[in-house]
Image: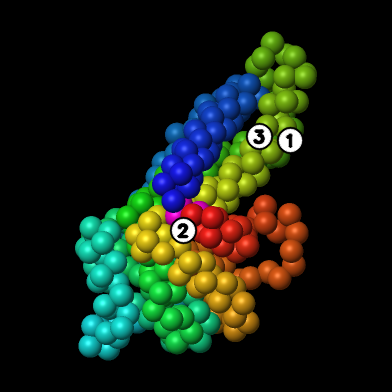
Amino acid sequence: MFDAIATNKRNSYALIFLATLILAGLVYAIGLYFEMGRWFVAPALIVALLMTWSSYFYSDRIVLSMSQARPVTKDQEPYLWNTVEGLSIAAGIPVPRLYLIEDSAPNAFATGRDPRHAAICVTRGLLDKLNRLELEGVIGHEMSHIGNYDIRFMTLVSVLIGSVILLSDWALRGLWYGGGRRRGRGGGNPIVLIIALIFIILSPIIAQLMQLALSRQREFLADASGAKLTRYPEGLASALEKIAADTEPLEVANKATAHLYIYNPLRDYRKSWLNNLFSTHPPIVDRVKRLRAM
C-alpha cells in the first residue's frame, strides 16, 4: 500500500512538472512565431485564474445541484453516517457533509475544496447493493480524495491546462484572422517557425491527455489511500467489481460531473486502448488487480 501511494504521488508530480514545461514551451513557441506573442500571456492567465477562483469556491454547490443530491442527517441514514463517522476519525479529518442521490445505480463521489468544506455523495443503489465492508471501501476511497486534497490538486492542473488551451486558441485565432500573416523571430528560419506552429497546434491535445493521465493517477492514489485507511483492500476491490458490473444507468450523470465519481457513470463498453487513453478513470481490471496485490 505504501509503495503504491508513493509511486502515484511521484507520477502526479512528474506530470505536473511536464505540464508546466508545456506551458512554458507554448509561450516560447508563440514568441517565436509572433512578434507580439507575449501579449497573449497575461490575458490568458487572468481569465484562467478567474475561472479557477469561481470553480474553487462554488464547484461543490454546482455539482451537488446538478446531481440532484439532497443532504441527509444521521437520523435519516444512520448506517451511512456511522460508516462515515468511523472513517473520518481514522483519517483524522472533520466529518464531511453527506448527500444522497435517489438513483438505483451504485456510485459515489466527493467534492469540496478542503477537509473543512467537503461533502461525500452516494446513490441509493450504493447503499442497497453493497455490504458493509464494500461500503467502507468506497467511503474510504472518497475520504482519501478529501484528505489528499485532490480537488485543490486538480484545480492547479486545470489552471495549467486551461492556460495552455487558451494561449493556443488565441494564437491560432490570431493566425487565422491575420490571414496567415506573421512577423516571425528565430532568424527567419522556416524550419524553426514550422516547428513552433506545430507545437502551438498540438500542445492543447498533449495537455488534455496529461490532464486525463493525472486524473487516473489520483484515482489509483485514492484507491491505495482508501485501502490504507480501511486496512482491507478487498472491500474496495469487491465494491468496484459490483459497481462496474451493474447495468443500471445513473440518470443524473453528465460529462461535466462524470470524472468525480468513483466509477465513470458514462460507461463505454467498447474495450480499446484508445478509450482507455481518453478516459478519466483507470480500467476497473487494473484497479482491482492493484488492490488485490497489496
Foreground mark, 2 or 1, reads 2
- How far apart, in angstroms, are the residues tagged by discs 2 and 1? 51 Å
Is 129 left or right of 34, judged from the image as shown? left
Q: Are marks 3 and 1 in contact (CB under 8 Å)?
A: no
Q: Is residue 184 visible?
A: yes
- In the rendered view, would you say 33 is above or below 202? above
- How far apart, in angstroms, are the residues tagged by discs 2 and 3? 36 Å
Quadrant location of residue 267? bottom right
Label 1 belongs to which residue? 179
Q: Earlier in the sequence, mark 2 or mark 1?
A: 1
Is 247 left or right of 108, judged from the image as shown? right
Q: Is residue 47 visible?
A: no
Q: Nearer the viewer, residue 277 or 82?
A: 82
Q: Amino acid at mark 2?
A: Asp
Q: Amino acid at mark 3?
A: Ile
Label 3 belongs to which residue? 200
Pick out the residue farthest to the right.
190
Q: Amino acid at mark 1?
A: Gly
Q: Please, what secondary structure does the residue beneath circle 3 have?
A: helix
Q: Which residues are magenta?
A: 219-224
Q: Earlier in the sequence, mark 2 or mark 3?
A: 3
Label 2 belongs to which residue? 223
Q: Are marks 2 and 3 in contact (CB under 8 Å)?
A: no
